[in-house]
Image (spheres, rainbow, N blue to C red):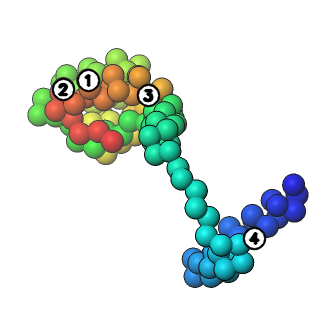
Amino acid sequence: MKKVEDIFKDICSLNIIDLGRLIEMAEEKFGKLNMKIDENNFDEKKKESIDNRKKSITLNKCGPNRIPVIKLLKEITNKSLIESKKIIDELPKLIIDDIENDLFLDYKKKFEDLGCVIE
């Protein structure tokens, strides 16, 4: 297995032109790989993988009324009103890092309902 890992490391160090040439050489030697991929199953697994990742909220733009946004920031981050206002004054700003997808979607909806632009 160590040999395969070493070969993989070598392949990863190739530039795109050399990688293309390597693929052409492998296809000449072994023929093209005709493998059918079940796209429906692949898409579901990919979507599930993306949905399970931890997410971050970056506030890019405050809504038209800053006071409810400041209150929401205070509630979510457990910061004081002054600290929450300072965050609004320094946009764009990372608000929360590494949260579960469900919590991310909940916070995202709350911010967007207030007219905020988040990432």
Question: Which of the two discs, 3 and 1, labels the residue nearer the N terminus?
Answer: 3
Three-letter amino acid code of the residue under disc 4: Asp
Task: Give the left or right position of residue 14, taking residue 50 as reference.
Answer: right
Q: Which residue is mark 4?
A: 10
Question: Which of the two discs, 2 and 3, labels the residue nearer the N terminus?
Answer: 3
- Image coordinates of residue 83 in percent, x first then y, are 35, 29
Real-space Cα separation, disc 4 to disc 1, in angstroms = 48 Å
Q: Nearer the viewer, residue 79 or 49?
A: 49
Three-letter amino acid code of the residue under disc 3: Asn
- Is residue 109 visible in the rendered structure shown here? yes
Q: Which residue is mark 1?
A: 110
- Local secondary structure at mark 2: helix
Q: Is 73 located above or below residue 62 in the figure?
A: above
Q: Which residue is mark 3?
A: 101
Image point (31%, 45%), residue name: 92
Real-space Cα separation, disc 3 to disc 4, in angstroms = 36 Å
